[in-house]
Image: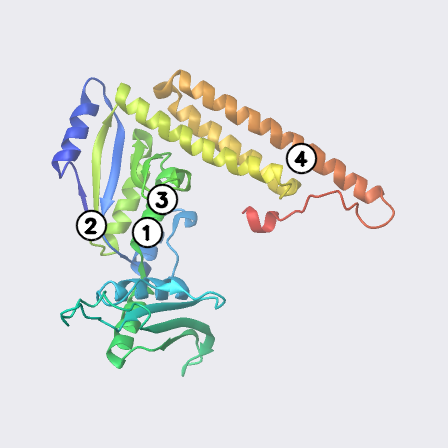
Amino acid sequence: MKNQNQKSANVQTANIQAVTGGTRSGAIVFWSGDTIPRVPMATAQVMQGIDTRFHVDTETAPALALRLALDWFASQDRSLLPPKSIKGSKGVWAIMRITCHGRDSEGDDKGSRAGDLSAMTEIKAWVEKLTRDASGNLVPVVKIEGATADEETAIRDQYDHLRTVVPSGKFGANVGEYIRGACGGVVLKATKPGKTGQGQGGSLYIPEGGMESWGKYCEALAQSGSEATIFEVPAMSCEQTASAIGAALNSEVEYELGKIEGEIAAAAIGEKALKGRQGDLEDLKSKLDEYAGMLGGLSDSIRSRIEDVDEAVNDAIIATVAADGAGELFDGPAPATRGIVDTSADLFE
């Protein structure tokens, strides 16, 4: 893993614009790379003292690994269509193979994707329930139908490989979650549209105070043996930087507030989880305090939104406690109109 600065012309251009007037206020981070060795990365994160909340999973889920293996396999041959889930068969994926080439009016071959596309065969694959292997360990069993021996071997080899690595999308999510949660950073541009608040990453801002924590992540990545490249562009205290960070922070806060408002509107969580949401709101306020000097008046409008949702959460707690009290006084089954179910064990950690 390399930690580099300004490796391409477009990055240099963006940096020149940001540098105009101002002092360094942190860094803008983005990366390139494929998969990350899973166990070495998890081990390195432990060695660096990184909070367990931000550790990569110890293994890739079998169903995800199989789906990604099928995606890869289908991309290797133009006669194969991308895998699709089979309706009514949960967890079963099919890759369609075009077998009828078709011919034009002169009898010439029109190509593997021409002709009667209804003449297809398919490769099916799915993960069966866990089965004990020869050593007595529980292992997932992958079933593949319709593939040649060589094709099945290729799919299985890719599946086995993907079980040992962090897929690139999951790596991006892990980087984003760490920068937001451990470094006090914000997502400037998400890899998936509409997912800014979920830390999917793409390009992120880290304030100067979070650079030490970020260094631990970079060191863990280096120790893992990953070939990923991390790019850091110095971020300067100036109007352009403040505008970009303000928009990103506002988007992140709105995403989190929208989730809480949705839970309140649906009466989906109970008193314990609602009090947990109050803690989440305090975390947002603390993060906003860190950026107040840079954002100026924008931080006031964002804080006002947080306060409004905090008040709504408090009202919901009062309503929930009142409903619980009514249920205890009611001689018989709880009123059907209560409408509040405590699913905090599932929704809140």
How many labels sit on residues? 4
Looking at marks 3 and 2 on the same chain, the residue that comes earlier in the sequence is marked by 2
| Disc 3/disc 1 C-alpha distance (Å) | 8 Å
Q: Judging from the image, what secondary structure is the residue with disc 1 in?
A: helix
Snapshot quadrant of residue 239: top left
- The residue carrying pointer 4 sits among few (fewer than 14), some (14 to 19) or many (20 or more) residues within 10 Å by Cα, namely many
> Which-is-in-front pick, marks 2 and 1?
1
Tell me the amino acid under the disc marked 3. Answer: Gln
Between tags 3 and 2, which lies in front?
3
The Cα–Cα distance between marks 2 and 1, rounded to whole angstroms, is 17 Å
Cα gap from disc 4 to disc 2, whole angstroms: 48 Å
Q: Spatial distance from mark 4 to mark 1, Cα to Cα?
A: 37 Å
Q: Position of residue 45 (x, y in %)?
A: 34, 51
- Quickly name the residue at label 4: 317
Front residue of this view, candidates 277 and 23: 277
According to the picture, the residue beneath numbered tag 3 turns out to be 200
Determine the residue positioned at 46% across, 65% down. Answer: 87
Q: Residue at x 36, y 41 (%)?
A: 193
